[in-house]
Amino acid sequence: MGFEIVEEEAIEGADPLPIPLLNLNHVSFVVRSVARSIKFYEEVLGFVSVKRPSSFKFHGAWLYNYGIGIHLLQCNSIDDVPRKKGIINPKDNHISFQCSDIYLLKQKLKEMGIEYVTAVVEDSGIQVDQLFFHDPDGYMVEICNCENIPMIPLSSCPLKFPYIKDPILSSDYGGKAYAKLMLGSCAAEAENVIMETLVTDMMDISF
């Protein structure tokens, strides 16, 4: 008597299981000099050196701030690190940080003698200021006020935000719909949550 293999059919209309990701944890850079890069990320960007696991068999360093880590790995050879580009190109690969005062940071870069270029992005009357510069190994860093641009999904996949102030919802909601929205898996459910919250707020005002 053999075993019968039963193939489960996908339930039509069923939502796929959500990907259990939480947030970006860190970015890693292979560098020519760990000490020089530590100095840059601490003094220019305000990162803080943190304890690195002792099990690593190669030289490096961990830094952390703003909810993200930067891991520095000492190169085995200078050839392991891309040659630093003389021109700052905003279209190159880069990491980006939001900033509450981009003009203050621009002044700091001038005082430290760090070359940078600026750019402006506009959409529907909204303007975003961008600032680009290189770290000691030529990796590019962007500073911007990108929070000015609303995060509007182009598909039905839900967005996960690391903080309660959800750009999809009006700040008037006070984040009350956040927990429910996180459980949703399509734009229609997000809309229902928003409308439900709006009705609740109207009832609170009425009574």
Image (tube, helix red, strand yellow):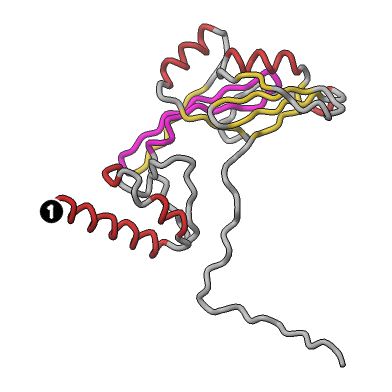
The residue at the point 34 percent across, 48 percent down is: 176
Q: Identify whether 23 is placed above or below 83.
A: below
Give the quarter of the image for residue 65: top right
Q: In the picture provided, is 74 more to the left or to the right than 141?
A: right
Q: In the picture provided, is 197 more to the left or to the right than 57?
A: left
Range drawn in magenta? 124-148
- Residue tagged 1: 207
Image spot of residue 134 (x, y percent): 62, 22
Give the quarter of the image for residue 36: top right
Asked which secondary structure carries label 1, the reply is loop
Magenta span contains residue 53: no
Between 131 and 182, the one nearer to me in the picture: 182
Image spot of residue 112 (x, y percent): 56, 8
Q: Identify whether 7 is placed above or below 200.
A: below
Q: Quadrant of the N terminus?
A: bottom right
Image spot of residue 53 (x, y percent): 77, 28
Residue at the outermost bottom position = 1
